[in-house]
Amino acid sequence: MKTINALTLLLTLFAFQGAKAQSQVYGGTGVRYSVGIETGLATGYLAKKYEAPLGVSVQAEFPITESILYASVNTGFNNMFVSGNYSRLVDDLQLVPVKAGLKYFYRSNLYLQSEIGFSFLLNKTNCVEGKKAAFVYAPQAGMIFYLHNNNYIDAGLRYESNGKFYHCDHTNNFVGFRIAWGFSL
């Protein structure tokens, strides 16, 4: 818990520095927004019961330094489809992740992103008493394809790890792909 509090404090400091740096350093168009679809492959223990996630997400990015570093916030909905063998035993996992992090551009269109937060479980199944929220972290690498008039396509590959929701479960990990349409104001 101390680690989560320290990371939250660090992200808050970056956000306040970003607002200050935006007025002094950033010469671009400001905050970036993107709306995307996500899919992937379940890995590890999750792959035994579930096939693949499918979801949607919205993201906002706040500039910290000119076209190099952004603070990001992200939320959406992910549905993990249960495999046929387990369809009578468990339900699909329906998650709402809420994440914040940093996005670093090491080239004008190539980036590394890391986010942490919580995933909220919408449908609690009858396994063993569990939690409604779990810690999530998601490192990602991606590429921006710039279009005209401040529009772009954002394509990224990431690994997402959700903590366990049930005592009889393990962490819920998947390798995901996100493609999004983005714009800046």
Image: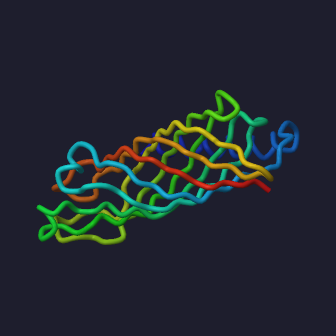
| Closer to the camera in the image, 132 or 177 | 177
Which residue is rendered at x = 45% and y = 43% of the image? 138
Residue at 75 percent across and 41 percent down: it is 17
| Vertical side of 96 occupied by 23: above or below | above
Residue 49 location, x and y as percent? Answer: 18, 56
State the image coordinates of residue 175 (x, y, percent, origin top left): 37, 44
Q: Quadrant of residue 86?
A: bottom left
**Of residues 75 and 158, the one drawn nearer to the viewer in this rendering:** 158
Q: Is residue 55 left or right of residue 106?
A: left
The residue furthest front is 148
The tally of labels here is 0
Q: Is residue 72 left or right of residue 170?
A: right
- The residue lying at 19 percent from left, 60 percent from top is 83
Query: Where is residue 116 drawn, in percent x and y?
Result: 49, 46
Q: Nearer the viewer, residue 92 or 155?
A: 155
Using residue 138 as the reference point, say whether residue 110 is left or right of it: right
* For residue 131, above or below residue 41: below
Q: Residue at x 22, y 70 (%)?
A: 125
Colour approach in the figure:
rainbow
Q: Nearer the viewer, residue 53 or 134?
A: 53
The answer to which quarter of the image holds residue 87 is bottom left
**Quarter the C terminus occupies:** bottom right
Q: Is residue 181 above or below residue 7?
A: below
- Residue 17's place in the image compared with 124, above or below, is above
Q: Tell me residue 141's x, y (percent).
A: 52, 36
